[in-house]
Image: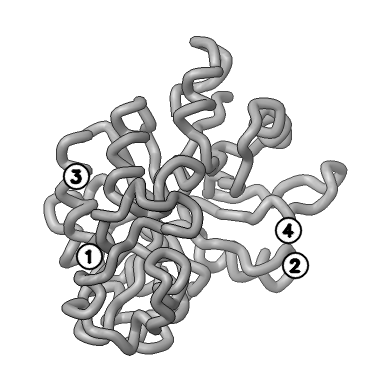
């Protein structure tokens, strides 16, 4: 079995997270999978952001679901506290921009995580319908993921796209939800995994763990039966792995 690497928010060790610059860099390096986060602005624009506010990336504490995109597009989004002036010309990336980028890399696949704050503000169906519409011709390259089973159920109702559920906890309740939802992927924070003596739940899904940044960590997850691993340094790991040691991302 080969373990595949996923560029977690692009490559946040070297680029502002969820930036087009970061995604382009890892795709150019040969990444086959990337992961991004989607929030919906007050005026219904799908942008790439993990956090519900813009504070970390833009240093402006604006709630995304309460702010129009026309305000956001004027703000530098270069994560100055980490990268100084290096990325001062970057702006918040939109989902349609990522969709357009994906078309230049037809072998790539993107895990698109729809975030809780936007689902809470706008409703699961509205958010999912908007995301699917914005993905357009790149839809077939995407897997929709979320912590919210309701949102994933709606994906199944209106499309044939694969889905991934992000586990909120390792518990009997989560196991039951997973069994009922039967997602194509189950995502688990490495801190929520049970001890190695406890087997992973069998099912129709592939297991994804986040995040691991060292080859030995990836190999350890592979030995447990993890199929995919998110990493913040995919370019380095791809370069370090020898051909045949693991799949190229």
Q: Name the mark on residue 132.
A: 1
Q: Are marks 1 and 4 in contact (CB under 8 Å)?
A: no
Contact between marks 3 and 4 (CB within 8 A): the answer is no
For marks 2 and 3 on the same chain, the one whose residue lies earlier in the sequence:
3
Q: Which residue is mark 3?
A: 101
In which quadrant is the C terminus drawn? top left
| Nearest to viewer (mark 4 / mark 2) | 4
Q: CA distance from mark 2 to mark 3?
A: 38 Å
Give the alpha-carbon distance from disc 4 to disc 2, as whole Å.
10 Å
Q: Position of residue 101 (x, y in %)?
A: 19, 44
Q: Nearer the viewer, mark 2 or mark 3?
A: 3
In the rendered image of this protein, does residue 2 appear above or below residue 140? above
Percent x, y of residue 171: 75, 67
The tally of labels here is 4
> Which of these two is toward me, 196 or 93?
93
Q: Which mark is first along the chain, 1 or 2?
A: 1
Tell me the residue that label 2 is attached to: 171
* Callout 1 crowding tier (Cα within 10 Å): few <14, some 14–19, many ≥20: some
């Amino acid at each position: 079995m080969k373990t595949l690497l996923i560029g977690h928010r692009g490559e946040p060790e070297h680029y502002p997270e969820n930036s087009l610059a970061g995604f382009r860099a890892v795709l150019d390096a040969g990444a086959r999978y990337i992961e991004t986060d989607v929030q919906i602005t007050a005026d219904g624009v799908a942008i790439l952001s993990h956090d519900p506010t813009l504070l970390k990336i833009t240093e402006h504490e604006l709630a995304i679901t309460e702010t129009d995109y026309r305000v956001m597009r004027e703000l530098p989004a270069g994560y100055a506290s980490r990268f100084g002036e290096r990325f001062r010309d970057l702006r918040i990336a939109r989902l349609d921009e990522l969709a357009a980028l994906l078309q230049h890399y037809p072998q790539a696949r993107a895990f698109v995580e729809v975030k809780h704050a936007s689902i809470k503000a706008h409703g699961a169906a509205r958010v999912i319908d908007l995301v699917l519409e914005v993905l357009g011709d790149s839809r077939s390259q995407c897997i929709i993921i979320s912590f919210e089973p309701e949102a994933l159920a709606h994906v199944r109702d209106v499309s044939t796209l694969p889905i991934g559920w992000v586990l909120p906890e390792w518990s009997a309740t989560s196991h039951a939800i997973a069994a009922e939802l039967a997602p194509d992927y189950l995502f688990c924070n490495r801190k929520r995994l049970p001890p190695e003596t406890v087997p992973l739940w069998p099912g129709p899904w592939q297991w994804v763990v986040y995040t691991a940044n060292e080859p030995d960590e990836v190999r350890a997850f592979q030995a447990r039966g993890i199929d995919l691993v998110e990493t913040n340094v995919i370019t380095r790991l791809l370069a370090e792995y020898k051909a045949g040691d693991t799949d190229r991302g």
